[in-house]
Amino acid sequence: MALFFFFFFLMIFKHVSMALADIGTATPYGPPYLPTQCNGNSIEQFPPGNLFVAVNEGLWDNGAACGRRYRLRCLSGRNRPCKTDIIEVQVVNFCPKSPCPSSFLMSKEAFSAISRFPNAKLNVEYIEYDIISQVLQPSISKVEYSLKF
C-alpha cells in the first residue's frame, strides 16, 4: 500500500509542486554574461546547460539571491510563445538594466527552453527550488521509511 502511495505521489509531484509558485515575467538577455554581481569573472558560476538568470531588485534580496535555484514555467505571452517544459535555473547576476524589464532576465539557452520565440516577453510561474525540497522531503522520508519494512 505504501508503494502505491509513493508512486502516486511521484506522478502528481510535477503538477503539485508548481501550485505554491509566484507569478512574474521573463525576457532574454545575451552575452556578454561576465562579469556578474555574484561571482565576478568566474566561468565556474554558470550551471550545466547555461540555464541561468539575472533577477530584478525584488528577487535580488541584497545579493542573497546569488546561487538560488528556481523552477520556471512559461504561462503566456504574445502569439502563444510557451513551450511546455519546466526548467531549473540558477541566479548568477543582478539585472544589469535599469529599470529591469522583467523579474528574470534569462540566458539565451534558458529562454529558448521555455519559449518558441527568441525575443518574447513571457509571463512565468516560478518557485524557489530549495523550498520545494523542504516542503516535500518529510513526505518522501515517511514513504521511504515504510518501504524498508
Image: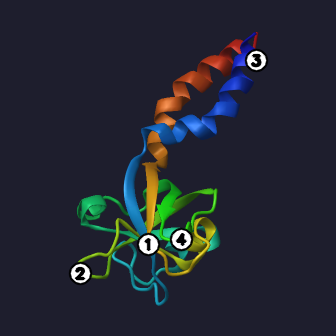
**10 Å neighbourhood of mark 3: few (<14), some, or many (≥20)?**
few
Q: Could you tell which of marks 1 and 3 lies nearer the N-terminus?
A: 3
**Picture coordinates of residue 93 (x, y %)?**
38, 73
Q: Could you give the CA–CA distance between mark 3 and mark 2, rounded to whole angstroms?
A: 51 Å
Mark 1 and mark 4 in contact? Answer it, CB < 8 Å. no
Q: Could you give the CA–CA distance between mark 3 and mark 4, rounded to whole angstroms?
A: 41 Å
Q: Which mark is residue 48?
A: none
Q: Could you tell which of marks 1 and 4 lies nearer the N-terminus?
A: 4
Q: Nearer the viewer, mark 1 or mark 3?
A: 1
Question: Which residue in the protein does label 2 denote?
Answer: 98
Give the amino acid at mark 4.
Asn
**Picture coordinates of residue 53 (x, y %)?**
45, 69
Q: Could you tell which of marks 3 and 4 lies nearer the N-terminus?
A: 3
**Picture coordinates of residue 103 (x, y %)?**
35, 65
Q: Nearer the viewer, mark 3 or mark 4?
A: 4
Residue at 60% in and 73% down: 112
**In the image, residue 42 above or below residue 102:** below
**How many marks on residues?**
4
Give the amino acid at mark 3.
Phe
**Picture coordinates of residue 47 (x, y %)?**
57, 68
Question: Which residue in the protein does label 3 denote?
Answer: 4
Q: Which mark is residue 79?
A: 4
In the image: residue 143, left or right of residue 30: right
Q: Could you tell which of marks 3 and 2 lies nearer the N-terminus?
A: 3
Q: Nearer the viewer, mark 2 or mark 4?
A: 4
Give the amino acid at mark 1.
Lys
**10 Å neighbourhood of mark 2: few (<14), some, or many (≥20)?**
few
Q: Could you give the CA–CA distance between mark 2 and mark 4, rounded to whole angstroms?
A: 27 Å
Residue at 56% in and 66% down: 80
